[in-house]
Amino acid sequence: MRKKLNLLDENVKLPKILWYIAWPAVLEQTLLTMVSYIDTAMVGSLGNNATSSIGVVSSTIWLINGIFAAIAVGFSVPVGRNLGAGNIEKAKSIAKQSILGIIIFGAGITAVVQVIAPFLPAWLGADPEIRADATAYLSTTSVAYIFTLSANVCSGILRVAG
């Protein structure tokens, strides 16, 4: 059986503590980057217009993913603090509230994206021949936002729970 690392032990060096805490996030970001590269390669095989269509709205999608990450932190930090303080019931209550937050924020952001998707490519200066594909891509990906947000929030809460 492997011995657990005591993060409060003063004899443990700071780099070891940082790596112990950071390695799951580093792995996650590496995998997400790989998915992005593979996605780009697959779309690249469809031609220049398909690649351009996705490129036009990709910054918006990354912005939304950043908002989802912030929402996940907003729920996971209070859960972690209460678990650390021994307030298990309060942590459970916040975790339950996160489900309502996922539904509200996920559905709300999806609705906003669905409304602006037809206009966003033009606002971003996309050529007329790729606007329809960019709109279709953004609209299609936004349908999964509630699941994406759910995965972000739930994995954040699981991380802080150990």
Image: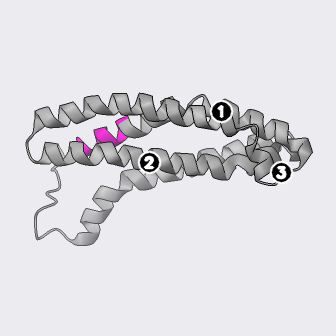
Residue type indicated by callout 1: Gln
Badge 2: residue crowd in 10 Å (few <14, some 14–19, many ≥20): some
Q: CA distance from mark 3 to mark 2?
A: 28 Å
Residue type indicated by callout 2: Ala
To which residue does mark 3 refer?
126
Badge 3: residue crowd in 10 Å (few <14, some 14–19, many ≥20): some
Between disc 1 and disc 3, whose residue precedes? Answer: 1
Question: In front here: 143 or 45?
Answer: 143
Placement of the N terminus among the 4 image quadrants: top left
Q: Is residue 145 magenta?
A: no
Residue at 18 percent across and 37 percent down: it is: 91
First to last magenta residue range: 154-162
Q: How far across and how far down the image is residue 76, in percent?
A: 29, 44
Q: CA distance from mark 2 to mark 1?
A: 20 Å
Q: Nearer the viewer, mark 3 or mark 2?
A: 3
Q: How far across and how far down the image is residue 37, in percent?
A: 67, 49
Residue 69 image label? 2
- Label 2: element kind: helix
Contact check, label 2 and label 1, Cβ < 8 Å: no
